[in-house]
Amino acid sequence: MSLPAQDLDQYEALFKTYNMKVVRSVQHKTEHRMSGRWILIGSAENHKKLTAYLLNDSNIQELSF
């Protein structure tokens, strides 16, 4: 996930609202952007709901799943 330079902690909180467990996360910051990579564990239904939410989030510039 690639975002404008901002705090990625809000996304970890979002993952919890979808009952996802964060197994690992990596964050990188450049001059104008922050990137985060997470491994999430949860039900297939919650993965679908979270993915739909993230695809509609205008702050996210790039998303791989």
Image (spheres, rainbow, N blue to C red):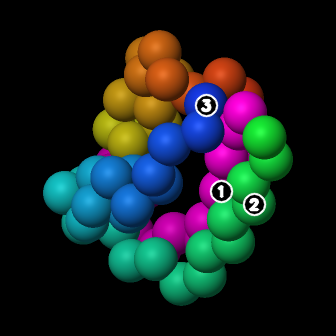
**In the rendered image, which quarter contains the N terminus?**
top right
Q: Is residue 33 left or right of residue 59?
A: right
* Magenta stretch in the rendered image: 32-47
Residue lying farthest to the left in this orientation: 17
Residue 36 locus on image (x, y percent): 65, 56
The residue tagged 2 is 28
Residue lying farthest to the front in this orientation: 31
Q: Residue at x 34, y 38 (%)?
A: 49
Residue 24 locus on image (x, y percent): 60, 82
Q: Is residue 57 left or right of residue 33?
A: left
| Residue type at numbered disc 3 | Pro
Residues at circles 1 and 2 in contact by the CB criterion of under 8 Å: yes
The residue tagged 3 is 4
Q: Earlier in the sequence, mark 3 or mark 1?
A: 3
Residue 53 locus on image (x, y percent): 37, 29
Classify mark 1: helix, strand or loop.
strand
Q: Earlier in the sequence, mark 2 or mark 3?
A: 3
Residues at circles 2 and 3 in contact by the CB criterion of under 8 Å: no
The residue tagged 1 is 36
Give the image quarter of residue 44. Answer: bottom left
Classify mark 3: helix, strand or loop.
strand
Q: CA distance from mark 2 to mark 3?
A: 12 Å
Q: Earlier in the sequence, mark 1 or mark 2?
A: 2
- Residue 43 in view: no
Would you call the spot at circle 1 few (<14 residues within 10 Å), some (14-19), or many (20 or more)? some
Q: CA distance from mark 3 to mark 1?
A: 11 Å
